Amino acid sequence: MQLSRDDLVGAYRRMAIIRKFEERLHDEIKTGEIAGFTHLYCGQEAAAVGVCDHLDTEDLIVSTHRGHGHCIAKGCDVKGMMKEIYGRRDGLCKGRGGSMHIADLSVGMLGANGIVGAGAPQAVGAAIAAKLDGKGKVAIAFSGDGACNQGTTFEAMNLAVVVKAPAIFVFENNHYSEHTGVDYAVGTNKDIASRAEAFGMKAWRANGCDYFDTYETMRELLDYVRAGNGPAAIELDTERFYGHFEGDPQRYRGKGELDRLWEERDCLKAFRAKVSEAKLLDLKLLDEVDAEVAQLIEEAVSEARAAPAPDPAHVAEDVYVDY
Amino acid sequence: MQLSRDDLVGAYRRMAIIRKFEERLHDEIKTGEIAGFTHLYCGQEAAAVGVCDHLDTEDLIVSTHRGHGHCIAKGCDVKGMMKEIYGRRDGLCKGRGGSMHIADLSVGMLGANGIVGAGAPQAVGAAIAAKLDGKGKVAIAFSGDGACNQGTTFEAMNLAVVVKAPAIFVFENNHYSEHTGVDYAVGTNKDIASRAEAFGMKAWRANGCDYFDTYETMRELLDYVRAGNGPAAIELDTERFYGHFEGDPQRYRGKGELDRLWEERDCLKAFRAKVSEAKLLDLKLLDEVDAEVAQLIEEAVSEARAAPAPDPAHVAEDVYVDY
Amino acid sequence: MAVMNIREAINKTLMDEMERDSNIIVLGEDVVGGAGTAGGQEAIGGIWGTTPGLYAKFGADRVIDTPISESAIIGAAAGAALAGKRPVAELMFADFVGVSLDQLWNQMAKFRYMFGGKTKCPAVVRLIYGAGMNAAAQHSQSVYAMLTSMPGLKVVLPATPADAKGLLTEALRGDDPVMFFEHKALYGVKGEVPDGEYRQRFGEARMVREGGDVTVVTCGRMVGFGEKAADKLAADGIGVDLIDLRTTSPLDEEAILDSVEATGRLVVVDESPPRCSLAADISAIVASKAFTSLKAPPAMITGPHSPIPFARELERAWVPSPQKIEDAVRQVLAFR
Amino acid sequence: MAVMNIREAINKTLMDEMERDSNIIVLGEDVVGGAGTAGGQEAIGGIWGTTPGLYAKFGADRVIDTPISESAIIGAAAGAALAGKRPVAELMFADFVGVSLDQLWNQMAKFRYMFGGKTKCPAVVRLIYGAGMNAAAQHSQSVYAMLTSMPGLKVVLPATPADAKGLLTEALRGDDPVMFFEHKALYGVKGEVPDGEYRQRFGEARMVREGGDVTVVTCGRMVGFGEKAADKLAADGIGVDLIDLRTTSPLDEEAILDSVEATGRLVVVDESPPRCSLAADISAIVASKAFTSLKAPPAMITGPHSPIPFARELERAWVPSPQKIEDAVRQVLAFR
Ligand SMILES: Cc1ncc(C[n+]2csc(CCOP(=O)(O)OP(=O)(O)O)c2C)c(N)n1
Ligand SMILES: Cc1ncc(C[n+]2csc(CCOP(=O)(O)OP(=O)(O)O)c2C)c(N)n1
Ligand SMILES: [Mg+2]
Ligand SMILES: [Mg+2]
């Protein structure tokens, strides 16, 4: 089915928010104001949005260390996120989590995760819960090409198949785990999706730098999973536009690689080209969206900067519901 | 190449020792004299012996909780093992390990293991060592069909492929992990070997209740691995003739299943039939071997019974080489 | 009050609570048994016999056999709990914390705090622990100290059938992750169990004996050993305050300190190696908070700094014994 | 003596020792970097910069980049060590013990004992630990107490470049598994490092300051904090015996007890939550073995019973500080 005009503008807006959010962080981190490790999602926007545009708040996702995109795509409050990354009291997690631990269960976002591979089994658990509830909801684990070598990811895939849970494994293959190439670290002589297939589930492949391809393929996948066929996997071929974390010298990149990626694999550029060629949307409209988004991010940053720091007296609160 | 007469008699003897060792334990455990959990290898003799008959002491193996067969096939002292299982001071591990922790590095046996799946990464490490030494040696991880769902096993397979280590994953599929059937727990809709293939290595399949099939298939596999092609896997279709551990009520067995297994899937019976049909060996000779073996086991048990207990004063020794 | 053993108390509590709350699910290896076999489901009900009957009553969606994948089991429990269920995951041997620690320690224990206090993770993990069955170094350990050290987890160790019911019920009504330790050598212990709804609050130690001369603090299987020692000592006119902690996190500091303030003498009995142990923890708390009351150095009865051995003679030497407790009590009493 | 920082001392020691002993191999995630990329090998040399140059010198068979599979990394180290090599495995963050504990705890720690004393497992595991970089709850933990509790492991925590060299060399010459903790906030700390062969025996604490009034026991990053506190206290005429444990297993009990016997007052500083911690361990040992010498209750300076928070203000509040140490020293001195 065709996406409506509103759908299209919404998808573009969400991708643009992620892009601007991350680019702004890329700049702000240089000022030294933001603490900790930050992993930017730039380049992969079509993946998160193409997947999450199918979900409502009762569909659950678990995310990774590179989680900002998933959070935004799933509906987390952008200003709350920015405050969290700035370590502010009113951040989405009261400044206790930071970039790697953003969660908001009210929108079905079960958490970014600093432990590579930890999310996949949790998604299976969430899927087991969804199956029990019988409302056709799904749980999605985002994992990187690096995470797909972690034992927990494998165990999760097998368990999901065994219990026929509506779990979906989205493998965002951005070709790198930190400084290591996917061709080295993923031993299979085929793709990641094939390995998922060998665990006994159906797997799809899509261009994770193309919103439409991701979105359409996910529709097919979700029809399959929501129909009660058990888990499924999808490998999204995508790109990381910045370093592994901010500060990474990126010596593993080939000559001209980054320029080429920005030129050929920019999902926002591709989206604009497609919708304008197909005369679905006027580019001026998207420019307006860009301007709105820029404004939103500007506000998010200045509000975060101005926001109060957490009170050290509360450092040990919220460890338990009750003790 | 044909096996010599001596080879054949030797293979039979080793299988017969395992069988008798285990059958005797099955009886002795009922007396209450043997402590702890004991997992018998009966039914799988052709697997251990068919694999290990290709190895010398510098080829290394890691084993499982069901390790007696691997130990015997790799050349561990049978009397030392029996003493160990009886928890005696002069047992192979001074009575500290027991059935689940028998090791003898002097014959290349790196240890049985109580943690399902723990051995596979260790075999990869041993294979990395072997590769560095450059003498064409290999390291073998025995794993069950249950162990092949443990994350460590998956990680080990991937790592072995990535570093091209001469590691060999022998999956003994005896169709059960404890009380659960392999068709339930292994989610892949194909066999275990296919899953190993999806990790990027070559995999073989053989009848683990047939010494000749196991032995010949392993020859091919070992030629491939020793030639420097990296790791490989083999799935051996085999059977467990007793319970998971001694005391298991075995309610998961189908009606008449055990009778059928003893009738149709007994590797010793099959061996005798094959060698006598082919007129390679006289059955009388094998009867003599059986008698010798019975004598050996009898001695092993009576010596173990008579052997001194460990001295409690030494309970905390040998924790470190030096402290 | 019905008389039953700990195994039965656990099974019955699971049964009752699952009946009451349809969000409770059970998962683990062979908790049903027989999946994918000719013999069919319900082949075992857990190798410790604590979960039979659940599958027949609550079905495959709520009583789930898993592959041998402990990280996935605990991770699935964590995810299901975030998603609003109350999973009860079984670790067949507590030693398998080794292959699943991350999901306990870095995941379920930390969600609430990391996520700003807006989530809860009401998962119960049943860990079967302890020595006494000659199961050797990898199947006999008491890992409660490790988990007690981890903020975000509650750690519970029933020593009686009544507490097994009361504490498990409490775990299933609460909203935090609970590590529920079941000692494999205690399953057969019988006792009276209150009928109907019965909850035992966490952080409330049980005064097993009141004696007034020496405070003996312990938990799990060691409680029974402490009773044996106390009985022998009583015959000599020595009165032991025997405290069964019931939960090590939260810890009933008050009960310990109150007793030590009266007795001035402390013996901690802990079925684990000595370093960074619960014995050390309790001793340090007492030394720092009841310093002026202490009339003798705290005595710690633990295993030695070694793995747990297989042979009967060795395992017996490794585990604290009633005799060692008795000796320690006499020694701290003799101190001036 | 050359002056270098801890990062350089570790790199140089690895370099020298690998040169000397061809059985030493290094493995971990991105210890080389760049495998399978257009940029090619040696893209990083470890994210902490401790392993650059090794690959160029010793090649792919001895310096091995691995997939993200910590269980397999530690397991492979265990197996390689059994097979006669001396693996040095890197856990990029000590917190990843969560996904690899079994291979440390139930495997390499126990081989020798379980197998009757006939094997050895000379594996060195480098764990990068500690708070101070706002890396939050899953990337800031000090897990040395957990590993100290495990018989069979040796636990080492250099606080100076000289000790980094001396202890790492010792680890690589010994035959037992060694947990080598490197504090991420200490890599830049400079100091003199002895030239040539230099080994620092395990179980030999370093007396950083001799003061005689109070004994402060600590390790790792907290040693520097202790020095700051000691300097301020010295200005007020308060003399601190500051003990850097260097290794927590084996533990130099003698050094601690000797000092406490003289000072009668103990402060333990431990970058970890309080329960079953090293602080508790040391306090309990002192309370039980130097009871009569103690003039004040042992003070334990630890983080609170909570995960480690992200925000600067919170992390700073969580971690023990020179100020808190100073306050504690004054308090134990004030006790009568
Ligand atoms: C268990 C664990 N091991 C290692 C790391 C360190 N680490 C963080 S991200 C990362 C690479 C992840 O690669 P991938 O899964 O492809 O995700 P990407 O970074 O490309 O998004 C590594 C090794 C970690 N956080 N957790
Ligand atoms: C990590 C771990 N999980 C669970 C167990 C308990 N356990 C021991 S053997 C076993 C079944 C193993 O099945 P399989 O690998 O097929 O080997 P088999 O028993 O058939 O030889 C289980 C679940 C264990 N020892 N270790
Ligand atoms: Mg990646
Ligand atoms: Mg099996």
Image: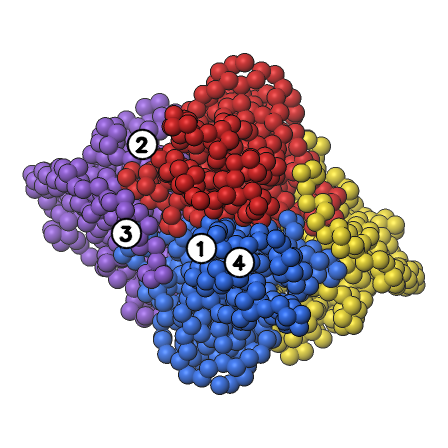
Chain colours: A purple, B yellow, C blue, D red
Q: Tell me which residue sits at (54%, 13%) in the image.
A: D1
Instruction: Say if D35 sits above or below B122 in the image.
Output: above
Along the horizontal axis of the image, is C153 left or right of D204?
left
Three-letter amino acid code of the residue under disc 1: Leu
Cα separation, mark 1 vs mark 4, equals: 37 Å
Q: Secondary structure at mark 1?
A: helix
Badge 2 is on which residue?
A246
- At label 3, counting other C-alpha atoms closer than 10 Å, the crowd grade (few under 14, some 14-19, many 20 or more) is many
Same chain, marks 3 and 1? yes
Residue placed most toward the observer, B268 or C258: C258
Q: Secondary structure at mark 4?
A: loop
Horizontal and vertical percent position of residue B287? 90, 64
Horizontal and vertical percent position of residue A190? 46, 43
Of badges 1 and 4, the one in the foreground is: 4
Of badges 3 and 1, the one in the foreground is: 3
Badge 4 is on which residue?
C264
The answer to whether marks 2 and 3 mark residues whose Cβ atoms lie closer than 8 Å is no
- Please report, as a chain letter, where disc 1 is located: C
Cα separation, mark 4 vs mark 2, equals: 57 Å
Cα separation, mark 1 vs mark 2, equals: 29 Å
| The label number, if any, that marks residue C104 in the structure image | 1
| The label number, if any, that marks residue C116 in the structure image | 3
Of badges 1 and 2, the one in the foreground is: 1
- Please report, as a chain letter, where disc 4 is located: C
Residue placed most toward the observer, A20 or B227: A20
Residue placed most toward the observer, C7 or C38: C7
Residue B112 visible at all: yes
